[in-house]
Amino acid sequence: MPDQDALIVGAGPVSLLLACLLVQEGLRVAVCERRKEADDRTREIGIYHPGLDALEAAGVGAVVRRAAL
């Protein structure tokens, strides 16, 4: 039997949000990422309202807003 209920491939924003939502539902989640080092460059210039709503639903909206530039 696997040690997780879900395996998410890729640690992009959508994948990480999905992982947060699944963990909130009580699932055991593993996230696999090919890159070995963090990339401090961003490809986004902003988060639109639907994205903020999704982050709020995941319970991390306030943390993201505090860390935003």
Image: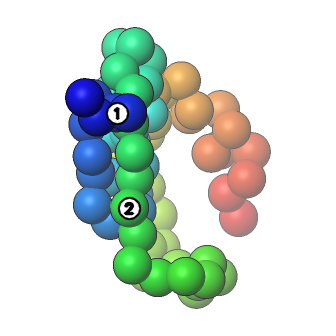
Q: Is residue 44 left or right of residue 38?
A: left
* Quadrant of the snapshot with the N terminus: top left
Is residue 67 or residue 46 the one in the foreground?
67
Q: Is residue 55 above or below residue 57?
A: below
* Residue corresponding to mark 1: 4
Q: Is residue 64 above or below residue 58?
A: below
* Residue corresponding to mark 2: 32
The residue type indicated by label 2 comes to Cys
Residue shown at 35%/14% (left/top)? Answer: 25
Mark positioned earlier in the residue sequence (2 or 1): 1
Residue shown at 55%/82% (left/top)? Answer: 36
Q: Is residue 42 above or below residue 58?
A: below
Kindly state the secondary structure of the residue where label 1 is placed.
loop
Could you tell me if the residues under marks 2 and 1 are in contact, i.e. CB atoms within 8 Å? no
The residue type indicated by label 1 comes to Gln
The image shows residue 10 at horizontal and vertical percentages of: 32, 65
| Residue 48 in view in this figure | no
All told, the count of numbered labels is 2
